[in-house]
Amino acid sequence: MSLPGQTIRFCTSADGARIGFATVGGGPPLVKAANWLNHLEFDWNSPVWRHWLRELGRDHTLVRYDERGCGLSDWSAGEMSVEAWVRDLEAVADALELERFPLLGISQGAPIAIAFAVRHPERVSHLVLYGGYLRGRLHRGLTPKEMEERELMIHMVRVGWGQDHPAFRQVFTTLFIPDADREQIDWFNELQRVSATPENAARMLEAFDRIDVRGIASQVRAPTLVLHAKGDLRVPFAEGRLIATTIPGARFVPLDSRNHLLLEGEPAWPRFLTTVREFLGVPAERSGVRLPLSPERRRQVEGLFDDVADLAPEERAAALSRASADDPGLRREVEALLADRDDAAMTSALAGLVSRVMRRREQEADDPGKTVGSYEIQEQLGSGGMGVVFRAMDRRLNRPVALKFLPASVGADAQLRQRFFQEAKAAASLDHSNICTIYGVEQAPDGRLFLVMPYYEGETLQGRIKRGPLPVAEALDYTRQLAAGLGHAHAAGIVHRDIKPANVAITRAGQVKILDFGIAKMADASLTRTGMVLGTLAYMSPEQAAGEKQVDHRTDLWALGVVLYEMLAGRRPFGQDTIAALFHAVQALDPVPLTQLRPEVSPALHHLIMRLLQKQRDQRHPDAAALLEALDALEPVRAV
């Protein structure tokens, strides 16, 4: 069985387990120890692994294999232990008759690579370890809460791993690649489903947690390079540092990333490649690493790419030769972009767009300057995932305004910019006293888009809650105003998607203003790149947290229920402090009854809140109008 560019074969481990392995590329061998989870066929065209395979196979014959229990290897293999995994690696190396080679260990592949290097020092020329550890979780002195989380994760795998719905697998995806985009998230969710049975996946997790190679790591004699992402959510940065301090002479390289698996578009990826290639002795001119370009050089590369991308192969080669006769490096850069386009099966126009956005690597400054057009910037009011807000004076109309500057990537990407204008136009059409007005959308000289909105004297609901639980009457008043504003938006076919106290302003007159209509859908998409942080996931409905692509107005009603509970209790209904525990709570648990926290909350009000927080959307209030009717029915007890 084979795919273009790779050859897949099988060998037998010492205990009889069949192990699937693949080779790709050319040159001296580079062996990658298996890690969670792999599938030789499924990985080949994936947006999470294909850049690893392409780049690591550029100067080496990359050897990789599926771990026992998953992918194309034996799913019925009995033993799962460091000893068994080392024997599997031995079987692959022996099948290819490899005498001496560099060994790459990623995640739990790192301790396997270490154990192999200690057992076979004569066979390992270099050791490269990324995102790895010496000790599994059971050897890290877990607190009772961390132990509970570990057991919960394993239980979630056994219960929900094989389901068609990705909700349970989404937790693991968020830990592995929090900054992934939607395509990468969907692929990783699916990888986990097709790669292993729920029982095998749970057994692997339990076995990984028992790993401990601290006692032998100091015996490694091969030159060792250790790399680790500073913000790794799956394996703590301290575990990578422990490897480097234990293996004699190891070099340690921190990387600026939160991803357990480095993604192609992030700055840490080219640094990883450059560092590894230098360590393995690959000449820079042969490595194919594309380092960040100067603006002038980038214009040259992009201009030539646009000129030749749609030419026939013979015409393209001739045009490249003419244009780069005195500049071989220019040709290499353009050919690399063309290869990326072909690998991803993109059109030339889309490939040009992607290459320019990916290589821009812009640093988005928060400070737009003292003046922007007719607006005089006065102070920064706040910042978040979708921009920075400033108070300003509109000198034309002599009125205070709030300017929300969006990430520079929104203005730089023509397709994203068009989408934003469509969303903002729809939001600007909403005329309601409880929805923040949008005066307009403008573009700064540096290309950044910004919203122009009224400046409201007052505070956010988040700030109000920080001072303590609200009186019942005040909380219900704000809830009624929020429901009225949401009902108006829902009638226009607009779902907010990000209702939370930080997105609710309260004026000094006590009027509620819902903020961020028009960019909420874009913020929702952005969460797939930046990871669902706890502060946002806590307000997401079960269907939205699970990654459903189509959510309706009832997701806003769920979030409103969370906000109402928080206003009355002074804390969120789902306050777990880890992603896994919080996700599980949103999907499966009920909050502490408000009547236990606030005795003055009536049973009727408690019932209303619990209906808003129903896991199944069809069991919530059907719409905001129905919610307002239910709130009106509480009128006799509102002043309690």
Image: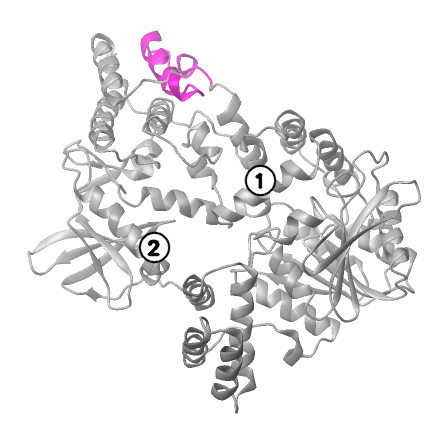
Q: Is residue 103 left or right of residue 483?
A: right
Q: Which residue is mark 1?
A: 189
Across and down, in percent, residue 596 comes to 43, 13
Check residue 190 for magenta coloring: no
Across and down, in percent, residue 467 comes to 33, 32
Q: Which residue is mark 2?
A: 416
Which residue is painted at 62% across and 73% down in the image?
A: 288
Q: Secondary structure at mark 1?
A: helix
Which residue is painted at 86% across and 58% down in the image?
A: 117
* Gap between marks 1 and 2 measured at Cα: 25 Å
567 lies above or below 273? above
Q: Is residue 430 left or right of residue 579?
A: left
- Residues in magenta? 592-618
- Give the camera-side residue of 417 and 41: 41
Which residue is painted at 77% across and 45% down in the image?
A: 67
Q: Residue furthest left?
A: 397
| Residue type, numbered disc 2 | Leu
Say if residue 505 shows up in the picture: yes
Q: Callout 1: 10 Å neighbours few (<14), some, many (20+)?
A: many
| Residue type, numbered disc 1 | Asn
Which residue is painted at 54% across and 74% down in the image?
A: 335
Check residue 595 for magenta coloring: yes
- Give the camera-side residue of 591 and 31: 31
